[in-house]
Amino acid sequence: MELRLRIVMPLAKLSMELRLRMSLELCFHIVGENKEHNEPIKE
């Protein structure tokens, strides 16, 4: 049981970090695209 926890916890942490990084990159990508699209048009 303890061995499984020792294996699962780092994996969960890693997947969480990956998910965070991917969502952050996605946010920056969307923001960057929005900036490029919105710059010529002033609202």
Image (cartoon, grey):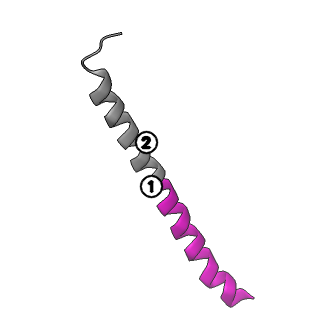
Please state the extent of the stretch shown in magenta in the rendering: 1-21
Near-viewer residue (1 or 33): 33
For the residues labelled 1 and 2, say whether their Cβ atoms are less than 8 Å apart: no
User: Does 32 sit above or below residue 38?
Assistant: below
What secondary structure do most residues of the magenta stretch adopt?
helix
Image quadrant holding the N terminus, namely bottom right
Give the number of the disc on residue 22.
1
- Relative to residue 9, is residue 34 drawn left or right? left
| Depth order, front residue of 26/13 | 26
* Residue at mark 1 to residue at mark 2: CA–CA distance: 9 Å
**Residue 12 picture location, percent across and down:** 59, 70
Between residue 40 and residue 14, name the one nearer to us. 40
Residue 7: quadrant of the picture = bottom right
Residue at (36, 42) in percent of width and height: 29
Relative horizontal placement of residue 38, taking residue 24 as reference (left or right): left
* Res 32 → quadrant: top left
Label whose residue precedes the other's in the sequence (1 or 2): 1
The reply to whether the magenta stretch includes residue 6 is yes
Number of residues whose C-alpha sits closer than 10 Å to that of mark 2, classed few (under 14), some (14–19) or many (20 or more): few
